[in-house]
Amino acid sequence: MLDAIHEEITRRKDFLDDEVSTIYFGGGTPSVLEAKELEKILEHIQASFDISSIAELTLEANPDDLQLEYLQSIRSVGINRLSIGVQSFDEAALRWMNRSHDAYQAHQALLDARKAGFGNISMDLIYGLPEQSASDWHHQIDQALDYELEHYSCYALTVEPKTALAHHVKSGKSKDTKSELQSEHFDILMDRMASAKIEHYEISNFARQGYRSQHNSSYWSGAKYLGIGPSAHSYDGRDRYWNLAHNAKYMDMIRAGDLPLEKEELSEVDRYNEWVMCGLRLLEGCSKKTLKSEFGSFHEHFIKEATPYIQENLMQESFEHFRLTQAGKHYADRIASDLFVVI
């Protein structure tokens, strides 16, 4: 797999013509790699792209992979940001979600990350579990804020099709999620983060000043990006690409001299819809200037569909932007869908 990844880097070195400002090891469990393996990939990237202005180099990891010695070793090869999949500090909740780590490991990973010298740490948390009360969720937030991390990513629990949890819900072994409960927890989350002066800069993401995820912010803003490895996605500013998700087939195609990717040519409607979807999720919202300059043919449609939401105080219009209010953030997907152009 590592050989295939290195080969793909070589073959796609002309995909990006700009400086690379962020690198993100994630989308799977990259912490299975040793520091020396990560270092070789980084050296190959440096040889293939201009990374002289690199600002953020993130590794996504589960708590049970992050022993102190490993943390020290990956920091020594250049990783300067961690995204740790804590999900919960509650033992029963972790077992219910079938997580591989326990609450002790979650706490220890955060302590060891600081001890190893990381000054930019993000934590993932999940809320809206069927048995989770408002008091339970407040307690989870208390523990998360005690670590004074730079970044928090918080997601409502979703029951994905064809998973063990989906089977348990269907068979009655587990309760399904409740939208009213998740909405209550989302309000608690927004209020608590605001009280802690942590900026709610994207629907699911909160950051202290100067610590927004630069990598994620780039693709939410429509920047070009290159993804390497099975199921990785790329965007060149006009079209979208994605690699095969099947590991063996991915490696077979690389060995055969082919690139294991498919391409989707984005129409003006596709690009407008993606701009709406991403823009509404961001604190800044959808830019009026961009709407007129890049999507002028949809300007009238946008205004028509947005007006009722503005009147209901779910959206607000400023001199430069249209953006969701706190109440509107509960309906982000529905509002975006109504603003989409459907052909």
Image (cartoon, rainbow, N blue to C red):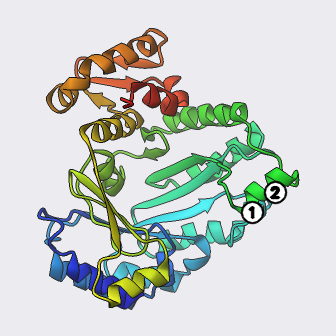
In this view of the protein, can residue 294 be seen by the observer?
A: yes
Q: Split into 4 quadrants, where in the image is the C terminus?
A: top left
Q: Return the residue nearer the eye: 3 or 253.
A: 253
**In the displayed structure, does residue 180 sit left or right of residue 48?**
right
- Residue located farthest toward the top when viewing the structure as drawn: 311
Relative to 213, is 81 above or below?
below
Residue sitting at x 40%, y 46%: 208
- Residue 216 at x, y = what percent? 36, 53
Q: Quadrant of residue 317?
A: top left
Which amino acid type corresponds to the residue marked 2 in the rendered image? Answer: His
Relative to 340, is 240 above or below?
below
Which amino acid type corresponds to the residue marked 1 in the rendered image? Answer: Ala
Q: Quadrant of residue 197?
A: top left
Which residue position holds label 2? 168
Residue sitting at x 32%, y 23%: 322
Q: Quadrant of residue 259?
A: bottom left
Q: Return the residue nearer the eye: 340 or 123.
A: 340
**In the displayed structure, does residue 66 sit left or right of residue 230?**
right
In this view of the protein, can residue 39 be seen by the observer?
A: no
Label 1 secondary element: helix
**In the displayed structure, does residue 302 sit left or right of residue 11?**
right
Relative to 63, is 183 above or below?
above
- Residue located farthest toward the front when viewing the structure as drawn: 343
- Residue 308 at x, y = what percent? 44, 11
Mark 1: give few (<14), some (14-19) or many (20+) Cα within 10 Å.
Answer: few
Label 2 secondary element: helix
- Asked if disc 1 and disc 2 are in contact, CB closer than 8 Å, the reply is yes
Q: On residue 164, which mark appears? A: 1
